[in-house]
Image (cartoon, helix red, strand yellow):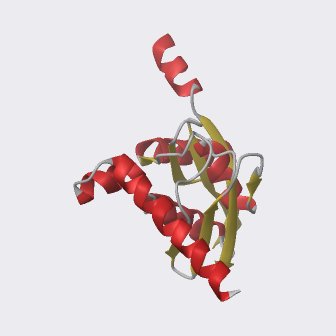
Amino acid sequence: MREREERESEFIDRLVHINRVAKVVKGGRRFGFAALVVIGDQKGRVGFGHGKAREVPEAVRKASDAAKRNMIRVRLKDGRTLHHDVTGRWGAGRVLLRAAPAGTGIIAGGPMRAVFEALGIQDIVAKSMGSSNPYNMVRATFDALSREDDPRSVAARRGIKVSQLQARRKETASTAEADETESA
């Protein structure tokens, strides 16, 4: 029992949205609640869940359980930001996530901010384009995070060493700078 409590305490959860819904019945209205929760360990694992119940605490508990069931791992650069810029979409919701230098902080709105805090990202710039529906924004953010690739997996996929990949990146950056100075 104690081990389970310690394991659960490593996760932080953020309540993103609560929706009150009403069902009209013979005696009046019956209210129910839907909760959207993001949960993470602040070390690169994050998940979201949706729960519905007649009472708010029960809906939040169900959503937290669902979030723990479908967690994803995201590889972070230096444990604080993304490796590269990435976009994600879900329905009409589109998000753009940009890697940021140290000290930038989390520049993101509402539902995306909750995801980044639970994930453990410290420096990121994010923009939501399209739908402002919290469900679509969270799902679009997860879509973007699932597209995130770290240099180790890219190098393995190409069959080269990470140092070779990094050298190529610096090489292309220096040629791009040289082209800019020639055109100016």
Q: Is residue 87 visible?
A: no
Q: Would residue 177 be visible to someone looking at this image?
A: yes
In the image, residue 15 sits, relative to residue 18, either above or below, namely above
Task: From this view, report whether residue 103 is shown above or below residue 126.
Answer: above
Along the viewing direction, whichever of 40 and 53 lies nearer the viewer? 40
Q: Position of residue 40 (x, y in %)?
A: 56, 40
Q: Nearer the viewer, residue 39 or 99?
A: 99
Point out residue 127 in the picture as x, y percentages from the top left corner.
69, 70
Q: Residue furthest bottom?
A: 183
Q: How many marks?
A: 0
Kindly identify the residue that appears in the image at 41 percent across and 61 percent down: 168
> Image check: 3 left or right of 98?
left
Residue 9: name its quadrant. Answer: top right
Residue 71: x and y, percent?
Answer: 44, 46
Residue 33 falls in which quadrant of the image? bottom right
Q: Residue at x 51, y 75 (%)?
A: 89
x, y (%) of residue 113? 70, 55
At x 40% / y 52%, what residue is drawn?
151
Q: Residue at x 57, y 33 (%)?
A: 11
* Residue ranking furthest to the top: 2
